[in-house]
Image (cartoon, rainbow, N blue to C red):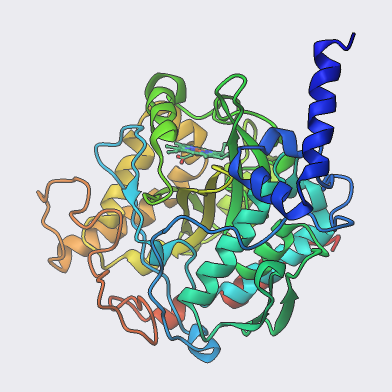
Amino acid sequence: MLDTNALILLGGLVICLLLSHKQITALYKKIDTGYLKKYLSFSPSSSPAGSRKNSSYGAKLEPLPKPTPLMITPEQVKNYDDRPWRPFRWPYHQTMSIFKLDINHWLDMDKYYWHYIQEKERIWLKYGKENIDWLPGSEDACFELMETVVEHMTARYPLLFTVLEDKGSDGKIIKNELTKEVLDMTLPLKENPLIYVSKLAKEDFYIVKKNPEDGKHYLVAAAVPFPGGSFGIDHKIGKHLDVIHDDVPYYHEKLKKSMERWFERLAPENPVERASWYISWDHKLKVSNVYRIPKFEADTVADINSTDPKEFNVRVERQTLRRLPKSQAIIFTNHPVFYSIEEMKNEPLVPSLIKKIIYEGPKDIIKYKNFEVLRDHISTYLDSLIKRQIDKGIIKEDTPLKTLPTYPFAYWAKTDFDFVNGWLNPTVDKKKFDYSATAKDELVYEDD
Ligand code: HEM
């Protein structure tokens, strides 16, 4: 007599013999096989390229919000500025602080695009899995992310990304007109999907999946060359969100429950965005030295003290969250955008808000963001900007200090922006605040 297991195995074999390969693939796509797939497809952790057709194109995506084409040319991107983030809140409480995302801004474009794509390549070659990695079981999500990024970039920026060849269910060959690179994404893929994603978009990507066994959300893959804190992705991958956010002030008391509830409900058609910020004096991308946790190195303090306060920046971590319909993975993007304090000096209350938050914000947030280490060095400068705003009549001595009405953006951000220059700051000579050249110098490390 055959036992139950043997019967199940025999049944499986008969089904496999009866179904063609195509039918099996179709069936496989209908059920959530994320955790089963690891047994069926390539193991990307050991072989980045994958040795055979590792996924398939062509399954119909749910109707998702589609971006509107933005007809900027590579030449115009050279002067193009992104939306001006000013995510300063007062009173400052730790909250989810998420906003509905206009899908046009899922993956933004600006004049630093080349800089970030080049840095991604350098970081991948030098640091490898410290910054870009994927676990078995994440293949479907990585593949779907690549498809979604390709769809977005070609639809939103038709003059920046050209489809050279569309082989239908076998994939596409794309030309990135900004870097001039031709990306052959036809099957079988020669690289892990995350490598293609990193050659298309300047954002960092985190891929999160729910484990049906414990109901928790885990980081299963990541392409994160520019982490906001001093961590390598090798310390976060495979961990669930509670562990990843363990050091985040008030996470357990104020964020955890609402985040869990929110993740359960997140629908593919309702993406969101949020932004957090730190203060930094450089544009170093892999590690923002100002933000070393738990301890900062001695030379960090020396660096801070020898830097002119006018050189200090607000590093905004601009983030988005969306769910992919097929794999059900949650995609979290993060992208650093630098604004010097000097370039925001004509915007009512901005210097006052920064000063207030770094001295009087919640104690644990001040510590987490290392404000204590740098605030005394920049406080005289901030005071001079506040006085300047009063003298110029930009604010009054008794103007109440509270979150800007245009939060999280600068007051001059508008939707009918200049198509050639994007959001060019009208309050200062923006050319003075183009940090491309400085960043290039800062990013060359001695051992490179
Ligand atoms: C609504 C969803 C989320 C909220 C409200 C949230 C909130 C936060 C907050 C408040 C911080 C501290 C820095 C800051 O002030 O922003 C943080 C850090 C971080 N978050 Fe999230 N987060 C969310 C989703 C995610 C997801 C999906 C990931 C993906 C893995 C993630 C990964 C991280 C990482 C890696 C850090 C840095 C932790 C460190 O300092 O070591 N977050 N998050």
Residue 272: % across, % down? 38, 49
**How many numbered badges does the structure rendering display?**
0
> x and y percent of residue 288 in the render?
61, 50
Is 428 left, or right, of 29 in this rendering?
A: left
Q: Where is residue 107 in the image (x, y as percent from the top left)?
A: 49, 64
Q: Quadrant of residue 253?
A: top left
Question: From what the image shows, is residue 69 above or below residue 73?
Answer: above
Q: Please state which of residues 42 and 81 is positioned toward the viewer in this rendering.
A: 42
Q: In which quarter of the image is the N terminus?
A: top right
Residue at x 49%, y 61% (from the top left corner): 337
- Would residue 232 be seen by someone viewing this image from the given angle? no
In the displayed structure, 218 sits above or below 4; it is below
Of the pair 232 and 368, the residue shown nearer to us: 232
Q: Is residue 429 left or right of residue 193?
A: left
Describe residue 90's horizontal placement relative to residue 39 as left or right. Answer: left
- Could you tell me which residue is drawn at 16 percent across and 69 percent down? 392
Residue in the foreground of this view, choosing between 178 and 209: 209
Look at the picture and state if 448 lies above or below 128: below
Q: Quadrant of the C terminus?
A: bottom right
Residue 242: image quadrant is: top right
Q: Can residue 132 be seen in this view?
A: yes
Q: Which residue is drawn at 46% across and 75% down?
A: 156
Q: Which of 8 and 423 is in front in this view?
A: 8
Percent from the top left, x then y, of residue 299?
69, 46
